[in-house]
Amino acid sequence: MTLVETSFPQDETKPKIFMSLWMQYVLDNFESVEQAIRSTDEITLDGWGWHFFTVDSNGNAAAIEFIDGKTSIYRDKELPV
């Protein structure tokens, strides 16, 4: 899931979490892709240059990227496969 261009948004008013810990947080706390996506607005990520792919039990899927300090979400027809 390496994405060299990754640049996480920075906001000193939000809690900062290492990206691999955020992945575990999502798995432990959320049931849906929508909940995982919303969580990106609640925290600041730090860590390696990665992007993320998430799927829920209802078949919803999304790719999440952080480029130029902005969050990009790709789902439905925006996903190539």
Image (cartoon, rainbow, N blue to C red):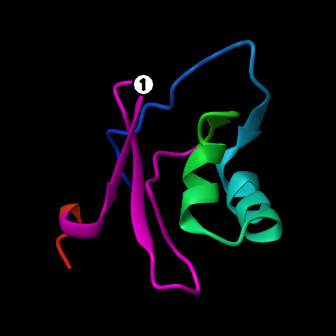
Q: Position of residue 59 (x, y in %)?
A: 46, 85
Secondary structure under badge 1? loop
**Image quadrant assignment for residue 79:** bottom left
For the residue pair 71 and 34, the one nearer the viewer reads as 34
State the image coordinates of residue 41 (x, y, percent, origin top left): 60, 34
The answer to which of 2 and 32 lies nearer the viewer is 32
Residue 55 magenta-highlighted: yes
Q: Give the quarter of the figure containing the C terminus.
A: bottom left
> In the figure, residue 39 lies in which quadrant?
top right
Q: Residue furthest top?
A: 12
Number of numbered tags placed on the structure image: 1
Indicate the amino acid at tag 1.
Gly
Residue at 39% from the left image edge and 47% from the top image edge: 65
At x 46%, y 52%, the residue is 50
Q: Is residue 64 above or below residue 47?
A: below
Q: Position of residue 7 (x, y in %)?
A: 43, 31
Taking the image as shown, residue 26 lies to the left or right of residue 51, namely: right
Left or right? Give the position of 29 relative to 76.
Answer: right
Between residue 10 and residue 2, name the one nearer to us. 10
Left or right side of 22 for 52: left
75 on left or right of 38: left
Look at the image and tell me in which quarter the N terminus lies.
bottom left
Q: Is residue 56 above or below residue 6?
A: below
| 48 over 56 or under it: above or below | above
Q: Which residues are magenta?
A: 48-77
Q: Residues within 10 Å of mark 1 (few under 14, many from 20)?
A: few
Check disc 1 and report the residue beneath it.
69
